[in-house]
Image (cartoon, rainbow, N blue to C red):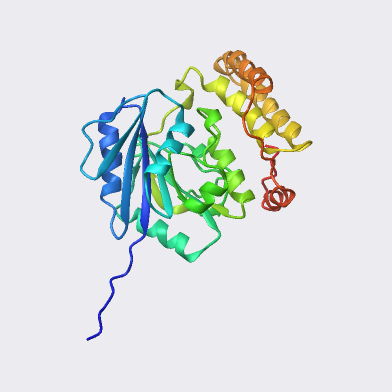
Amino acid sequence: MTRVTAPVRPQVGVVVLTQGTRPDDLDAALRSVLAQVDVEVDVVCVGNGWSPVGLPDGVRALALPENLGIPAGRNAGVPHVAGDLLLFVDDDARLDGDDFLSRAAALFAADDRLGVVQPRVESPGETAPTRWIPRMRKGDPRRSSPVFSLWEGVLVARRAAFEAAGGWGDEFFYAHEGIELAWRVWDAGYEVWYRGDLACLHPAIDPARHDFYYRLNARNRVWLARRNLRWPFSWAYVGSWTLVALLRSVRSSAGRRSLRPWFAGWREGWRADPGERRPLKGRTVLAMTRRGRPPVV
């Protein structure tokens, strides 16, 4: 008698990050992960300065004694999950459909060079901001394309690519860590794609609700350049975003008020230690340029 071996289901290590301030949203995020079919999920809920409680069966808790910031919190969860693929989910996001992960896993199985996938973001009852489509020509949000920046709320990564890129940049704390991850994944020889045929759900929110938004936005722009770019790209990148900030400031009184914290962060970016420096290879900069996204904006 010939024994039929059941197909091996892809294993996905899942890191869900939370500060414990949105228990209903967190529960929805976790249950959207546990509902996935045709994959094995190994799920850890990372409490950033909080000890997660009341979690569904099948989810382990990892309590961090203090809020280490978003990138460091995600990184902390990675060693605690198994799987050749990694799924990162923020507690205010959830997967759309129970086949999200099986479809994502099929994309990675079909292309050894695929390193990271960002899904399309939908905001039920609202219009999702176009900034969540990480390309300059937004167009149809359902169109897939290679990209050089990422919205970080929901991502699927090949573990080998994530590790080759050095993981998330702990030093950023908040904002722009997805840009660096995308750059470094490309630099490691993998590709980063926005997939318009995969979807997640996230409320349409204003990032400026955080009082530190403008300061960290500017600081981390400078740090991106200092950590990842050689001259003249480093100066061109910082200069172009400084010009963008100035142009935005003339549009409204709110924009003008943002300049003070923005330039405080800009100065901090030059004065403070940005952490590890790993300049992009010339071939990576060339690949970005050929695809219409040189690292100058």
Compare residues 236 and 30 and report the one nearer the observer.
30
- Quarter of the figure that contains the C terminus: top right
Residue 194 visible in the shown view: no
Residue 31 visible in the shown view: yes
Q: Is residue 232 left or right of residue 175?
A: right
Q: Is residue 168 left or right of residue 16?
A: right
- Residue at image location 58% in from the left, 48% down from the top: 185
- Height in image: 102 above or below 134? below
Tell me where residue 41 appears, x and y as whole percent. 32, 51
Where on the picture, by quarter, is residue 244?
A: top right
Q: Is residue 246 left or right of residue 118?
A: right
- Quarter of the figure that contains the N terminus: bottom left
Tell me where residue 178 appears, x and y as whole percent. 53, 39
Compare residues 297 and 44 and report the one nearer the observer.
44
Compare residues 143 and 157 and report the one nearer the observer.
157
- Residue at image location 33% in from the left, 62% down from the top: 9
Compare residues 66 and 210 and report the one nearer the observer.
66
- Residue at image location 46% in from the left, 27% down from the top: 69
Where on the picture, by quarter, is residue 52?
A: top left
Tell me where residue 117 appears, x and y as whole percent. 48, 51
Q: Give the residue at the far bottom of this rendering.
A: 1
Where on the picture, by quarter, is residue 5?
A: bottom left
Tell me where residue 128 appears, x and y as whole percent. 43, 38
Q: Give the residue at the far right of this rendering.
A: 232
User: How many marks on residues?
Assistant: 0
